[in-house]
Image (cartoon, rainbow, N blue to C red):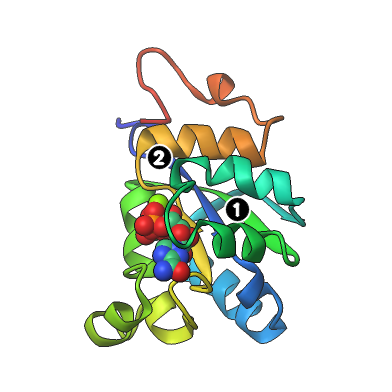
Amino acid sequence: ARRLSKVLQLTLAVIKPDAVAHPVMLEALHQRILDNNFVIVKCKDLVWRRRDSERFYAEHSGRFFYQRLVEFMSSGPMRAYLLAREDAIRHWRELMGPTKVFRARYTAPESIRGQFGLTDTRNTTHGSDSIESARREIDFFFPDFCMEEWMDKEEPLFR
Ligand code: RTP
Ligand code: MG
């Protein structure tokens, strides 16, 4: 029999401050996660200091939107989820829809950003874009989570 662990993947999802500020939206997004067969491994509400924001988005330093992104992400509470599902990274990004709000509205109106996104920065959610970023981001938000413990050399849970 195939082990469940064979098909699971982990990803890091964040509900950004624009969405957390509205309880109805926060609840809708939480429900959306459950409706799409993700297992919530860990969940936490937190507020970033400016330096956390700068560190997390260091790869974007120098881009024209960096300052406002850093400012915005440390402007209020957000919620981080450690999610598990088969193909979790791809599924969560598909559910979020395109980063750019105009694109989300027109090409994926049912997606989270298509429905709730305000601007390209205040676009309700974040999701890891690769296995490497998922590892880095899970460790950033959940340093106590021992990924190695979830891995089995023969049949890795995390791929
Ligand atoms: P994310 O990192 O949130 O999953 O988004 P992404 O990969 O789809 O987009 P990326 O291009 O990596 O953008 C990184 C973050 O910068 C914000 N952003 N703001 N014009 C703007 O104001 C602007 N452009 C991008 C995005 O919201 C994303 O959080
Ligand atoms: Mg990105």
Q: Position of residue 87 (x, y in %)?
A: 32, 47
Query: Horizontal and vertical percent for residue 135?
Result: 48, 32
Q: In the displayed image of the protein, which residue is found farthest to the top?
A: 153
Q: Dot 2: what SS?
A: strand
* Amino acid type for the residue under numbered disc 1: Tyr
- Residue bearing mark 2: 9
Type of residue at label 2? Gln
Picture quadrant of ligand 1: bottom left
Quadrant occupied by the C terminus: top left
Q: Is residue 89 left or right of residue 141?
A: left
Residue at horizontal 68 percent and vertical 31 percent from the top: 143
Nearer to the camera, 12 or 9: 12
Q: Earlier in the sequence, mark 1 or mark 2?
A: 2
> Which residue is nearer to you in this view: 119 or 139?
119
Mark 1 Cα-neighbour bin, 10 Å: few <14, some 14–19, many ≥20: many
Q: Is residue 49 left or right of residue 151?
A: right
Tally of numbered tags: 2
Residue picked out by circle 1: 81
Q: Which mark is residue 107?
A: none
- Nearer the viewer's eye, disc 1 or disc 2? 1
Residue displayed at 30% across by 30% down: 1
Report whether 51 appears left or right of 124: right
